Image (cartoon, helix red, strand yellow):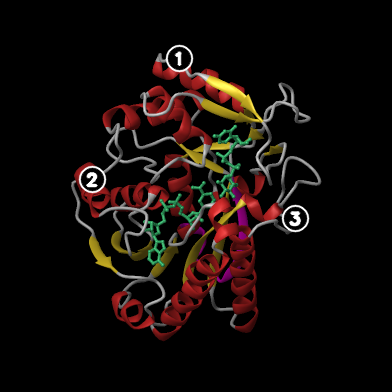
Amino acid sequence: MKIFVTGGAGYIGTHTCVELLNDGYEVVVYDNFSNSSIEALRRVEQITQKSLQMIEGDIRDEVLLTSSMQGCDGVIHFAGLKAVGESVEKPLEYYDNNVHGTLCLLRAMQKNSIKTIVFSSSATVYGDPEFLPLTEKHPLRTTNPYGYTKLVIEEILRDLFKSDPTWKIMILRYFNPVGAHQSGLIGEDPQGIPNNLMPFIAQVAVGRREFLNVFGDDYQTPDGTGVRDYIHVVDLAQGHLRALEALKTPQCTAINLGTGRGYSVLEVVKAFAEASKKPINYTISPRREGDIAACYADPKNAKELLNWQAKRTLKQMCEDAWNFQSKNPEGIK
Ligand code: NAD
Ligand code: UFG
């Protein structure tokens, strides 16, 4: 089977390409390298000792997209912009890249009669949780333009399936992906100051940043800091293969990919300090606007419908993130 992977040079994309190639899939990556580099794909080839096809292109270039995916059997759609704060400042860019880009992709798929797609959604579509753990039945709503793009794309996919029930659509709602491939060759490589917790901690450990700002210690959580469901990126990547296998039959299904267990900011700081054997200096700062107290998945549907379950522990997530960071102190160039 040949899979067309949009955004395949990015963080989750590269890890998924490794799993696809190791499992015998042929892979075509389509990426504009706006947040990644071709070097990351070379490293995927180095890890797997297999080659993949790389096409530099934007998902909004429908003509190039349509010709590039010829002969593919299915699509995994990672391409998009993902920074919540930036989406508030540049909403038009976010709607254009994510929503318009996805419309171009779906039209290109129609033209090629490819009707199998796995889409990267996010736990952000649940907004501030009414109950925990979050099941897929939790009401959907969100608070920022990035979240709206995910929600709108989910609705587009559900409408598409209603109009043509021969489509095979899997919407994966990721919780907090962290960690790296155990080789240390690929991992999370944010440009500029990291928005997310684990890459920020990793840069403190390696000496690129002085200290971590812990955003709030007065939440209704056991130690007052925010609680999230961190999931190892290799577990997440493997979830995509299970999703492709489940798409033997037409459907449009949304599934959480998380561990079901939440950890606080201070628990992650402690685990990372142990894994890296480096002190992680931190200071308590005011809450970050838009943050919620706690968020973790009910992973039951993933187990039942995809036969998938996250296996890797927080210790492993920190060790692998540290292995990548210490081998690539300035990221992947
Ligand atoms: P990433 O930025 O590392 O990867 C995205 C890739 O898409 C990059 O290689 C980028 O160059 C490419 N891209 C962006 N816009 C493009 C366009 N218009 N045309 C072609 N390529 C384009 O991000 P990631 O962490 O790997 O996330 C992948 C997907 O998962 C995204 O859709 C993101 O919204 C979603 N997601 C990520 C997280 C997370 O915390 N990392 C959580 C939930 C959902
Ligand atoms: N945090 C800090 N200091 C930092 C960064 C984060 O204390 O420098 C805290 C946050 O307040 C939060 C926790 O660490 O309590 C996790 O924050 P992240 O920014 O790593 O992750 P979020 O849960 O805020 O958001 C991430 C992605 C979103 C996605 C969401 C759910 O950035 O795009 O997970 O999947 F929608």
Type of residue at label 1? Pro
Mark 1, other Cα within 10 Å: few <14 / some 14–19 / many ≥20:
some
Q: Give percent across and percent down for residue 181.
A: 35, 37
**Quadrant housing residue 67:** bottom left
Tell me the residue that label 2 is attached to.
43
**Which stretch appears magenta?**
245-257
Asked if residue 1 can be seen in this view, the reply is no
Tell me the residue that label 1 is attached to.
279
Type of residue at label 2? Arg
Whether 147 is drawn above or below 58: the answer is above
Residue 39's mark? none
Whether 139 is drawn above or below 60: the answer is above
Picture quarter with ligand 1: bottom left
Task: Name the residue: 57% across, 65% down.
Answer: 91
Q: Give percent across and percent down for residue 149.
A: 59, 65
Q: Give percent across and percent down for residue 245.
A: 46, 58
Whether 196 is drawn above or below 35: the answer is above
Q: Considering depth in this image, is 113 or 99 the residue closer to the camera?
A: 99
Q: What element carries label 1?
A: loop
Q: Is residue 254 magenta?
A: yes
Tell me the residue that label 3 is attached to.
137
